[in-house]
């Protein structure tokens, strides 16, 4: 798909396009072609979601165009994750479609090895994204029956338009870092970053650092900071499950054998209690729902402990509740406590930016840019609109979505044949 077709004339070029997918995207005149580049399927995003979709389409010989706002594939993984990151789930639950990991891949894959796998994936399926292409808008033309996608090249400033019969939103649920609004934050005189900008704790030694957020990123960053000599505190506002990676692996195995999820959750909670003890006295309260059910219903994952709990128990990492306000370098909490900090790391998650550019997608996406329908029926909208990677189910959810989207497009094209 990388090598462009060579045409001997404009007429041959026009004829080939019309013959490739006739009637799906009409080209009323040759002059129109110069204004609008045609794509049967347009994929927005070249992270794991977009790459998985491209591979699945390629396997079915369906042509596509894939565009990416950054200058590389999997930019979130390359540019916005900390160095010590590993996949929290076993590799068997984290494969991309149609390509297993090499046999010597460890069970829990380090970031650099996962990126090597992604590079091999791109090469294997000959995926050629158009980089530095930022989507300005996607509008559905109800007369011509295609999506009009306007992009902006961030290098040369050129604006391009595409006419796409099918549009796949693969920009992901983690498009932009989310920092909550806190009174006084703008006046904090220390260093403030989102976890997407955190690489390692080397530069924070001997500093007083507050990590806001108690998901996997927050807990692991807190561990990294404390281990590198930072005086570390963490804000834990919500109930959470703390598990070992072995417990989650076992739970997912049991669930895959069709055991009732509530029964599997019961086993996990009991074993976690036996392993960690009662964590409520350290400010860590367990949710009412079990870890697998909570993930299925809300998308919230259990925290895979990397040693953070032991540091909390020892007092090396202090736990605080909800922040009420910030005054200078002093953070005040709802329970009346206050403490001085040199830096704040917000591990407060991400938001979808799809609604910034996607128009006419209201039947599929809600106001937060996430699917309106629950898994497994979330991936399809109307008028050839799809989304991949919005199920809050990690790489396995991405593989599920990508296969469904490709198969659905193939079924539609089969109904349209012969032409």
Image: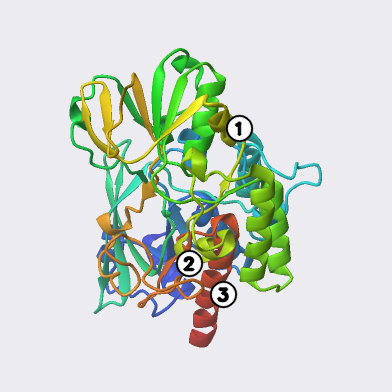
> Which mark identifies residue 73?
none
- Residue 139, image x and y in percent? 26, 66
SS class of the residue under badge 1? helix
Label 2 vs label 1, nearer the camera: 1
Q: Are marks 1 and 3 in contact (CB under 8 Å)?
A: no
SS at mark 2 in the image? helix
Q: In the rendered image of this protein, does residue 272 appear above or below residue 219?
A: below
Residue at screen point 31% across, 77% down: 145
135 or 274: which is nearer to us? Answer: 274
Mark earlier in primary sequence (1, 3): 1
Q: Residue furthest top?
A: 206
- Which residue is at 63% across, 44% downward? 277
- Upstream in sequence: badge 3 or badge 2: 2
Which residue corresponds to mark 2? 297
Q: What is the CA distance from the residue labelled 2 to the residue labelled 1?
A: 29 Å
Q: Residue at x 30, y 30 (%)?
A: 337
Mark sitting on residue 407:
3
Residue underneath mark 1? 310
What residue is drawn where x is 52% and y is 53%?
301
Front of the two marks 1 and 3: 1
């Amino acid at each position: 798909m990388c090598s462009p077709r060579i045409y001997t004339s404009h007429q041959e070029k026009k004829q080939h396009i019309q013959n490739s997918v006739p009637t799906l995207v009409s080209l009323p005149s040759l002059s129109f072609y110069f204004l609008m580049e045609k794509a049967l399927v347009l994929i927005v995003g070249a992270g794991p979601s977009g790459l998985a979709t491209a591979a699945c389409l390629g396997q079915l010989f369906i042509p596509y165009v894939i565009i990416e706002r950054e200058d590389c594939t999997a930019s979130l993984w390359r540019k916005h994750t900390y160095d010590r990151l590993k996949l929290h789930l076993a590799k068997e639950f984290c494969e991309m479609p149609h390509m297993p990991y090499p046999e010597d891949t460890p069970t829990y894959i380090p970031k650099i090895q996962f990126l090597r796998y992604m590079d091999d994936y791109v090469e294997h399926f000959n995926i050629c994204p158009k980089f530095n292409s930022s989507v300005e808008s996607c509008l559905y033309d109800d007369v011509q029956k295609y999506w009009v996608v306007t992009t902006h090249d961030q290098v040369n400033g050129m604006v391009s338009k595409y006419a796409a019969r099918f549009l796949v939103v693969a920009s992901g649920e983690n498009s932009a870092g989310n920092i909550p609004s806190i009174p006084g934050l703008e006046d904090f005189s220390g260093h403030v970053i989102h976890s997407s900008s955190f690489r390692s704790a080397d530069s924070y030694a001997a500093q007083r650092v507050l990590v806001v957020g108690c998901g996997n990123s927050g807990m692991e960053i807190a561990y990294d900071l404390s281990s590198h000599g930072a005086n570390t505190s963490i804000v834990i506002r919500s109930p959470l499950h703390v598990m070992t990676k072995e417990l989650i692996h076992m739970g997912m195995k049991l669930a895959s054998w069709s055991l009732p999820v509530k029964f599997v959750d019961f086993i996990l909670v009991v074993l976690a209690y036996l392993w960690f003890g009662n964590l409520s006295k350290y400010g860590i309260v367990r949710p009412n729902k079990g870890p697998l059910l909570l993930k299925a219903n809300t998308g919230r994952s259990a925290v895979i402990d990397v040693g953070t709990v032991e540091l909390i128990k020892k007092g090396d990492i202090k736990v605080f509740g909800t922040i009420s306000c910030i005054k200078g370098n002093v953070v005040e909490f709802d329970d009346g406590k206050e403490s001085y900090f040199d830096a704040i790391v917000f591990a407060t998650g991400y938001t979808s930016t799809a609604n910034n550019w996607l128009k006419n997608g209201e039947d599929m996406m809600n106001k937060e840019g996430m699917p309106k329908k629950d898994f497994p029926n979330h991936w399809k909208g109307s008028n050839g609109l799809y989304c991949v990677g919005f199920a809050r189910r990690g790489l396995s959810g991405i593989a599920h979505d990508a296969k469904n989207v490709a198969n659905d497009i193939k079924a539609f094209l089969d109904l349209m044949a012969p032409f």
